[in-house]
Amino acid sequence: MKRTILVFCSIFLTTPCFSQFIFSGTVMDNGGDYLGSGAEPVQDLTVTIMAEDGNNTSMSATTDSQGSFSIILPATHVRTDAGTTPHGFRLLQNYPNPFNPSTVVGFIVNEPGPVTIDIYDIRGRKIRKLLDGFQQESGWIVWDATDDNAVPVAAGVYICCLNTADTRTAIKMVLSDGRHRSLSPAAALPLPPVPAGESNALTPQPDRYKMLITGTDIRPFTMENIVVSGNHHVAVTVERVVRDNDGTLYDVVKIGDQWWMAENLKVRRFRNGEVIPFITGYVDEWANLSTPGSCVYGDSEDTPESYGLLYNWYALADNRGITPPGWHVPSDLEFKELESFLGLTGTQLDSIGRRGSDQGMKLKSQTFWADDGNGTNETGFCALPCGYRVKEGYYGSETRACAFWTLTQIGENAWYRSLGGQSSQIYRNHTDKVYGFSVRLVRD
């Protein structure tokens, strides 16, 4: 720890800056979009700040449980028009003062020359030599309340003296507590106040930075040309996503308190890496399946990629796992929670067939539905008319309907939901597990 402190101090003495700035922020998700119950802080994201001056400087932090982060930025540009100060060397009041456990001591250099900075206790005994050398420019140094042997000193009053060939000046410093904690870059202090009349000498010029926010469940976020001339705070909204077993990213949307995929699943591998059987062109083979199967509507390369794949129920229930960690195939009860939020009553929720009034419109996309069947998509669910594959292996209802599996069984069948181009309601029923339906995942 002693060696780390010495290295840290020497770095700042050779840097032409007087202070550091705190770049902080809060990162929230897009849970307030559409009909979501509100944005939530996003934890464990990596926030990287990069200087845009071409020197490849970058600093990173991780967001906490409140979505907050804090990064110390060096103020790298200092004005050189400091010739108006009356003395070649000046010692500025330390900051903070009183302090614990560390404080910043700044000095002004208007002409190169030798300078020493020493710390004395109230009895005049030398405690610590902070600086001894030829100085070309203004700078600052940290005293961590230790003596020359790196032993923590007691609380009390201390005198900091600056000496040159023809200048001697001193300031009084108060250590408020003798408890010692080592200084780290994360504990660096903000800009000390500059005495009146000396702002030209020590006011940092604005720096420009680029911010990149990344994480496993968000779309990467970039903000460029951020002008920083002091402590800086940003409030950022990032978009949550989900990545399937193939590495494909999907948009997600919060509806009430549930997070749903806003696109149809199109994964081709189980979580263990094994391929989900993909059936093309063989009607009888599909009809006779009692094991996992997937397909694309019409076995056609012209099928829009946004339709996703169609899966039989067996693919969803396979213990090799079709879902990525943190997400699952919804149950019949979880679909009911969605429908209840949209306004279905208890009796309607348990009914079979078309239920409700305009709840289906809120789930359907605003385009692609035939026969004036487009929805309002108030939820952001964006259901597309991608059709389905029936038990006998044939495809049907493209542009006019879609269906979504649940994981809930009833006898030899399983529950599902469907939306129709000529209906504004949500259809609920159960059917044979060999049907090929679309899949939307919900977050755990």
Image: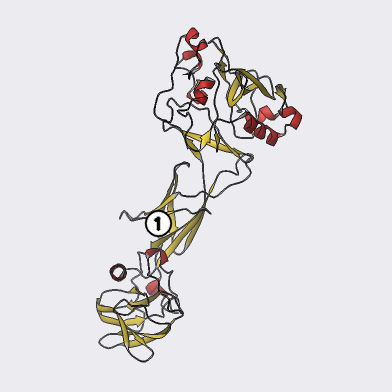
Q: Nearer the viewer, residue 323 or 82?
A: 323
**Can you give x and y, in whole percent of width and height, for residue 152 in the image?**
36, 78
**Can you give x and y, in whole percent of width and height, for residue 323 in the image?**
49, 31
Q: Is residue 68 left or right of residue 124?
A: right
Q: Nearer the viewer, residue 267 or 358?
A: 267
CA neighbours of label 1 inside 10 A, class few (<14), some (14 to 19), many (20+):
some
**Can you give x and y, in whole percent of width and height, for residue 46 in the image?**
42, 50
Q: What is the count of numbered marks?
A: 1
- Res. 70 visible in picture: yes
Residue drawn at point x = 46 percent, y = 15 percent: 300
Above or below, 259 against 196 in this view is above
Above or below, 390 against 201 in this view is above
Secondary structure of the residue carrying numbered label 1: strand
Which residue lies most toward the top here? 284
Which residue lies most toward the bottom here? 123
**Can you give x and y, in whole percent of width and height, for residue 381 in the image?**
59, 32
Residue drawn at point x = 51 percent, y = 21 percent: 314
Reading the image, the residue beneath label 1 is: 208
Q: Nearer the viewer, residue 404 or 308?
A: 404
Above or below, 222 against 269 in this view is below
**Which amino acid type is marked by label 1?**
Arg
Q: Quadrant of the N terminus?
A: bottom left
Q: Is residue 53 left or right of residue 28?
A: left
Above or below, 211 against 153 in this view is above
